[in-house]
């Protein structure tokens, strides 16, 4: 079974998206939730991950991919978004959610694409996918969520190129020509790795986080110049930063307020500086709301005038 990860013919080319017709915009989030620490040891840290999502949900997220996620319903409840999103939970701590007012599920599934090496073994690694149609425009998105193999930058037992090929095969197997493809995740590989370099041959690299030199990534077959609002949202209690991008599949690219620096312009500190991220701060006025610093940019912005209320 292990040998099978590295076998097979090269993946077909990924098609160009259908960018004709009325405007279709997709706001996505990818977030490794650090579940064993944030939820099992710290019991959710006062809902810090949910706060991060809720405070950056304007405009609303269309699709969200989570890694190290064991209960996406709990995350949505903490963000007070449980009535707006449908979701699916995978076999290896992968979860995804999509906004039901805007998107209709066509099909979804999960395929194994890699396996950790014996040096740092946790098991097999999957690519979770959902094919979703926009209710107004009919545009279809193949949304793919992945948590990559360990050790970092190894690509697992068959190496980074084989893992990238297996992810690309999931895309070409379940997507259809014309679909917009959006691939997100904690790849456990950064831009220096063979895996990410190989994915860049067939997909546009949209944005990366800062953890591990950029192991959290967003890719698409939509050209990178049509992807805006590239934002590092901070950790929200995790050891990874949540990152987001808005993909303009069709229609004009809308002018948006300044966001985080481009992915290729480190450091990304301005994305976490006070006032640099979009947050709804009404929660910060509540008693004890600012008692725990969750490390997010929204905490820094919203709690700046409320730190004195913390109860010891």
Image (tube, rainbow, N blue to C red):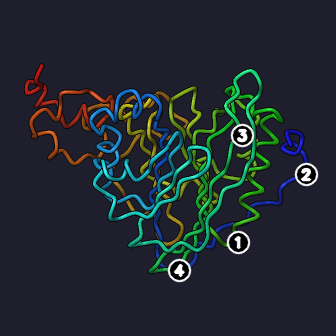
- Badges 3 and 1: C-beta atoms under 8 Å apart? no
Q: Quadrant of the C terminus?
A: top left
Q: 180 or 122: nearer the eye?
A: 122
Mark in the foreground, 2 or 1: 2
Q: Compute the Cα span from label 2 to label 1.
A: 21 Å
CA neighbours of label 1 inside 10 A, class few (<14), some (14 to 19), many (20+): some
Q: Of marks 2 and 3, which one's residue comes earlier in the chain?
A: 2
- Which mark is first along the chain, 1 or 3? 3
Residue 61 percent coordinates (x, y): 40, 58
Is label 2 in contact with label 3 (beta carbons under 8 Å)? no
Residue 58 on image: x %, y %: 30, 56
Q: What is the quadrant of the N terminus in the image?
A: top right
Q: CA distance from mark 4 to mark 3?
A: 35 Å
Determine whether the residue tagged by mark 4 lies in a helix, strand or loop.
loop
Residue 176 numbered mark, or none:
1
**Left or right position of 221 against 232:** right
Q: Is residue 232 left or right of residue 143?
A: left
Mark 2 or mark 1: name the one nearer the start of the chain. Answer: 2
Cα gap from disc 4 to disc 1, whole angstroms: 14 Å
Circles 4 and 3: CB atoms closer than 8 Å: no
- Pointer 3 residue: 124
Label 4 sits on residue: 138
Q: Considering depth in this image, is 200 or 312 the residue closer to the camera?
A: 312
Q: Nearer the viewer, residue 76 or 272?
A: 76
Q: CA distance from mark 2 to mark 3?
A: 18 Å
Checking the image for residue 287, the label placed there is: none
Asked where in the image residue 221 lies, by quadrant, the reply is bottom right
């Amino acid at each position: 079974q292990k040998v099978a990860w590295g076998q097979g013919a090269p993946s077909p080319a990924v098609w160009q998206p259908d960018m004709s017709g009325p405007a279709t915009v997709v706001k996505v989030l990818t977030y490794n939730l650090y579940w064993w620490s944030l939820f099992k040891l710290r019991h959710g840290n006062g809902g810090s991950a949910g706060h991060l999502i809720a405070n950056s949900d304007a405009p609303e997220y269309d699709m969200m991919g989570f890694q190290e996620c064991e209960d996406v319903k709990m995350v949505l409840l903490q963000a007070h978004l449980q009535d707006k999103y449908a979701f699916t939970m995978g076999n290896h701590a992968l979860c995804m959610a999509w906004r039901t007012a805007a998107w209709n599920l066509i099909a979804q599934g999960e395929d194994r694409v890699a396996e950790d090496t014996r040096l740092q073994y946790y098991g097999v690694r999957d690519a979770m996918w959902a094919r979703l149609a926009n209710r107004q425009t009919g545009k279809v998105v193949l949304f793919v969520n992945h948590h990559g193999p360990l050790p970092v930058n190894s690509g697992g037992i068959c190496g980074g190129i084989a893992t990238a090929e297996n992810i690309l095969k999931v895309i070409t197997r379940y997507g259809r020509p014309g679909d917009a493809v959006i691939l997100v995740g904690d790849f456990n590989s950064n831009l220096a790795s063979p895996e990410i370099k190989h994915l860049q041959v067939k997909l546009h690299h949209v944005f990366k986080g800062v953890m591990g030199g950029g192991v959290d990534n967003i890719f698409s077959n939509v050209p990178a110049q049509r992807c805006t609002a590239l934002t590092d949202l901070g950790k929200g209690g995790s050891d990874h930063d949540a990152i987001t991008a808005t993909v303009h599949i069709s229609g004009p690219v809308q002018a948006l307020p300044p966001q985080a620096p481009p992915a290729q312009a480190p450091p990304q500190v301005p994305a976490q500086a006070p006032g640099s991220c979009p947050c709804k701060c009404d929660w910060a006025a509540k008693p004890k709301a600012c008692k725990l610093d969750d490390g997010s940019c929204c905490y820094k912005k919203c709690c700046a005038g409320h730190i004195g209320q913390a109860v010891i």
